[in-house]
Amino acid sequence: MYELRRSSPGAGLVELALVLLLISAFVTCMAVFFVVRTFVKYEAQRKKLYVALTCCVGCAIASGLLYKATGFQGSPVLAAAGIAELLISCLIVELKHRETLLRENVNIIDEVLHKPWWGSEDKPLQEQEIEPVAA
């Protein structure tokens, strides 16, 4: 009933370019949301994050100046390195202060009552395994 017809062989390349464009736009939006969320969520670490942001902006400006001065085609790598540095810094701050790595709130009574006081915690591992046998 329906047929898929292509008018030219270049139509596949256009479709591939559009898909890659959509994927890159999605990844860019997610990276921006991640950076903004990290800045908002971890206000105590803003100084470290601002240093990373300053380095990122500085790398982007240096990349543009380098390209303008020399015409070097590889200068956008410097901007990409700055962006990667900002994303890695945000990831480190988030992993360091993530609540899943913090100690659980346990009841102190349960912790004291269920802890062996005179058990095998005080003995070294070698003494635990080798106990003298009375003959």
Image: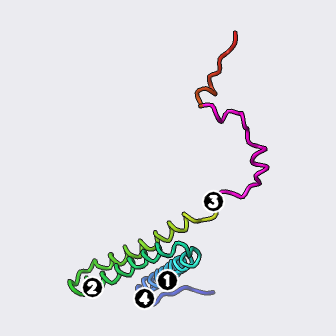
Q: CA distance from mark 1 to mark 4?
A: 27 Å
Give the residue at x 51% y 87%. 5
The answer to which of marks 1 and 4 sits earlier in the sequence is 4
Decide which of tag 4 and tag 2 comes sooner along the chain. 4
Q: Marks 2/1: CA distance?
A: 25 Å
Q: Earlier in the sequence, mark 3 or mark 2?
A: 2
Provide the residue designation for mark 4: 8
Q: Describe the element under mark 1 as helix, strand or loop.
A: helix
* Secondary element at image label 2: helix
Look at discs 3 and 4 and give the one toward the viewer.
Answer: 3
User: In this rendering, is residue 64 above or below 77?
Assistant: below
x%, y% of residue 134?
A: 69, 12
Q: Which residue is mark 2?
A: 65
Horizontal side of residue 98 vs 107, given as left or right: left
> Mark 3 = which residue?
102
**Nearest to viewer (mark 2 / mark 1):** 2
Taking the spot 73% from the left edge, 38% from the top edge, the residue there is 116
Q: Quadrant of residue 56?
A: bottom left
Direction from residue 81 to residue 45 in the image, left or right: right
